[in-house]
Amino acid sequence: MQTLAITWLGHSTFIVRTPGGKRLLFDPWLSGNPSCPDAHKKPPKVDVILASHGHFDHIDDLVACARESGAPVVGIFELCDWLGRKGIQNTSPMNKGGTQEVAGLRVTMTDARHSSAYFDNGQMVYMGEAAGYVIRLEDGRTIYFAGDTCLFGDMRLIGEMYKPDIAFLPIGDRFTMDPAAAARACEFLGVRQVVPMHWGTFPLLTGTPSALKQLVQSKGVEVLELEPGQTAE
C-alpha cells in the first residue's frame, strides 16, 4: 500500500492517488483555470475521472481528459449521455443513492444542492443534477467529495451511513457554502480532516481556509490547506 496523496490543481480540481495506486481526477478544469499552474494544464494520466456537475469551472477539460487518458468517467446519467454525444464512450453513468465499483473502488453518488448546465454550441444544455461522491479506499478509509453545494441536513445521513474520514468541501461563498456552513458540514459528517475547495479563484469567492480553521480547530478537525499544484500525503 502507498500513502494517500492529494494534489490540488486549483478551484475544485484534484488528483487523488489512492493507497492502492489508483489516480482519481475530480472535476477537471485545467486550461482555462486561472489558479491551475501551467505545468498541470495538460490532461494528466489517470485511472478514473469523476465529475460532480456540468458547470464550466468543473468540466471544461472533461472531454479532453477523457480522450487523452481513456479513463472511465463517472457522472450522473445526463452528463454521461452528453459525453457520449461528444464521442466519449468509456463512461460509468449513475445516479444519487447508487453505488458501483470502478477501478476496484466502491463509488457512491450522493446528493448535492446546486444547479448543473453547460453552455455548448451557443445554447445552455441541461446536465442533470449536481452530485457528490463517497469513495471507499483500499485501506478502509472513506473520502467524501461534496462537489458544489450548500449545506443540507442530509449530510448527517452521509456521516452516519458512510462515516467519511476526509471531506472535500467548497468554502468560497456566493455560489456554494461559506466557511461557517462548511464548519457545520464537518460537524454533520463527523470528519477529522477537511480539504477546502472552490475558493480564491475569483474575487467573488470570499471564503478562506483561515476562516474555516478558526471555526473547526477547537473541534479537532484538521484543515488541509493546499497551494495550487501542491501535493499532501
Image (spheres, grey):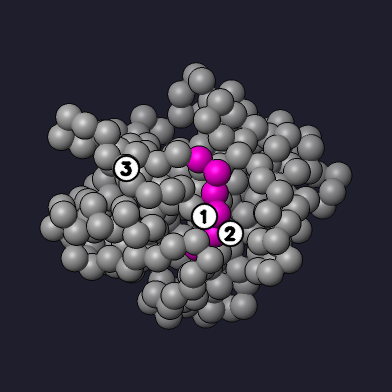
Rendered residue at 21%/32% (across/down): 123
Rendered residue at 71%/49% (across/down): 153
The image shows residue 103, relative to residue 44, as above or below, that is: below
| Residue 171: image location, x then y, percent | 60, 36
Answer few, some or many: residues within 10 Å of disc 3's Cα (few below 14, many 20 plus, some between 14 and 19).
Answer: some
Marked residue nearer the N-terminal end (1 or 2) = 1
Q: CA distance from mark 3 to mark 1?
A: 18 Å
Please state if 88 lies on the left or on the right of 23 as rendered: left
Residue that numbered label 2 is attached to: 144
Q: Quadrant of residue 158?
A: bottom right
Residue toward you, 211 or 53: 53
- Which label sits in the foreground, 1 or 2? 1
SS state under label 2:
strand
- Whether label 2 touches label 3, CB < 8 Å: no
The image shows residue 24, relative to residue 197, as above or below, that is: below
Rendered residue at 52%/30% (across/down): 175
| Residue 22: image location, x then y, percent | 41, 71
Q: CA distance from mark 1 to mark 2?
A: 7 Å
Marked residue nearer the N-terminal end (2 or 3) = 3
Rendered residue at 62%/36% (across/down): 177
SS state under label 3:
strand
Residue toward you, 13 or 181: 181
Any part of residue 126 in sight: yes
Residue that numbered label 3 is attached to: 126
Residue toward you, 125 or 187: 125
- Which label sits in the foreground, 2 or 3? 3
Kind of residue at disc 1: Gly
- Whether label 1 touches label 2, CB < 8 Å: yes
Residue that numbered label 1 is attached to: 132
Marked residue nearer the N-terminal end (3 or 1) = 3
SS state under label 1:
strand
| Residue 52: image location, x then y, percent | 43, 51
